[in-house]
Image (cartoon, coloured by chain):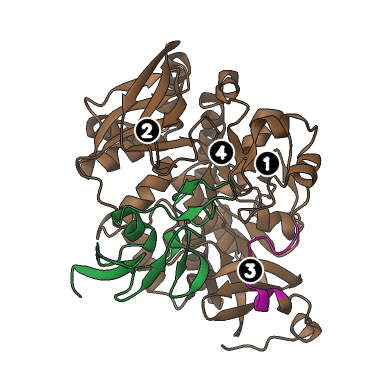
Amino acid sequence: MQQRFDILVVGGGPAGIAAAVRAAECGAKVGIVDDNPNLGGQIWRGASESIGEAASWRGKLQATNVTILCGTRVFHQPRAGVLFAEHEDGLQVLGYENLILATGARERFLPFPGWTLPNVMGAGGLQAMVKSGLPIDGKRVIIAGTGPLLLAVAAYLRQKDAEIAVICEQASIRNLARFSIALLRHPQKIRQALRLRKDIRGVPFATSSWPISADGRNALESVTISRNGKHETIACEYLACGFHLVPNIELPQLLGCQIHGGYVQVDELQETSVKGIYCAGEPTGIGGVESSLVQGEIAGFSAASRPEEARKLFGARERGRDMCSLLDRTFRLRGELRNVLSSETLVCRCEDVSYSRLQKHSSWRAAKLQTRCGMGPCQGRICGPATEFLFDWSPDSTRPPIFPARVDNLAAMTEPELQQTTISGGS
Amino acid sequence: MPDEITIVVDDSPVRVPSGASVAVAVAIAGRACRTSVTGEPRGPLCGMGICFECRVTINNIPHRRACQVFSEPGMVVRTGD
């Protein structure tokens, strides 16, 4: 199927929704494409509340005539102005005049012995599973890693009657104290923090604490944590584990957008180094939902050639930038997290490549070629950020397809007819 | 719409909440999703379609990400590939 849009938005989280709404309100023909079965991104996933920010933006989106393409995964750009995406029903050829990338972020996972056991999940991963219907009431859960997401997940799971055995935050109490003081500049965040504190009252919260092993026969049975230098083994049914977030920059990279320090570089109008391609939200810096929304709005106005509307939002965006660097400082990973791996600990889960096999290599590329690390279906999305932390390796070039695609869809990548075809207006 | 539906996971019927992902159905059935290249059982990690650990065969189509597919009545899921 072929469709053409004035403005195509990739990613249906807060940034993507805000971008699509503003662009459509300016009269552009807008499409929004997302891999997930529903819009909302990870943060608003399955949000069914009838009030609040998610509901308000959903209402705004419904009031427009934006074309929504869910369950559709972009995997290739055959030429400028066209993207190939895969849907259950086949290949989607999406043409665009301007493109807005709102590809969001994923959790950073760090390997430790036992982390491949079933029921060891991401913190956001377990929350997503519960939102997708996983019964968690009465289940004993340990939450570990770093970053504000841990508290949000704890509050959510507790509300669903899970028993939270402990939250292990690797950051020190000193970093967290500084963070609290700096939050005073962000009244909205303060309100959120106070609400969270109320929601997780009574849950044990350990700082300078991290998992050192997960154990069980066929699935998780217990977790050993390090807490103030002492080891402690705790029985549990789930370990929800995430070490802050890493941006999804594979598509921006494929399209040739300039990346610096792991983030997509944008100008004041959220335009990337590639003319007509804009980027908003977490790929430009991990700043959270408010920041993503305002960047999305700016990108939407900019892509629709309304810079004067975009400019009105610059002030609001500044506050988000400040939050981004504050989060980076507070939740910087401590070196001790590198010491928990044993030689047999798997680092690449797709190809089952152990830590000791990787230690023999000096770069991501050498490790890939010699061990197949990063060459499985996740294409290094999980082990890449882990090896970046463990070995200071940086992943090299991104090549299409950026997601595994079915053979018939891959074949389209080489079909001259589809590459050259002009996509006419309408759908 | 009924509150629960029945799907088949590894030849056994499983009752799951309506709207549950296939990954949830597999978890309720007490099964792991896939078997790794060295033979380890694996279940979902990221829950958002990135890690590919939750791959299962759905209605004879292999390598579907269970976390990205809704359960539908009568669906037949096979794990362990």
Q: Which mark is residue A405?
A: 3
Residue B42 lies within the magenta run: no
Residue at image mark 4 = A321
**Looking at numbered disc 3 in the image, what kind of residue is underneath it?**
Ala
Label 4 chain ID: A
First to last magenta residue range: A399-410
Residue A407 lies within the magenta run: yes
Q: CA separation, marks 2 and 3?
A: 34 Å
Label 3 chain ID: A
* Chain letter, colour brown in render: A
Residue at image mark 1 = A262
**From the viewer's perspective, is A338 left or right of A187?**
right
Q: Same chain for the residues at labels 2 and 4, yes or no?
A: yes
Q: Which mark is residue A357?
A: none
Relative to residue A111, is residue B5 depicted above or below?
Answer: below
First reached walking from the N terminus: tag 3 or tag 4: 4
Residue A95 in view (yes/no) = no
**Looking at numbered disc 4 in the image, what kind of residue is underneath it?**
Arg
Relative to residue A425, is residue A167 depicted above or below?
Answer: above
| Mark 4 nearby-residue class (10 Å; few <14, some 14–19, many ≥20) | some
Whether the residues at callouts 1 and 2 have beta carbons within 8 Å, the answer is: no
First reached walking from the N terminus: tag 2 or tag 3: 2
Q: CA separation, marks 1 and 2?
A: 26 Å
Q: Same chain for the residues at labels 2 and 3, yes or no?
A: yes
Tag in front: 3 or 1: 3
Q: CA separation, marks 3 and 1?
A: 25 Å
State the residue at coordinates (36%, 47%). A127
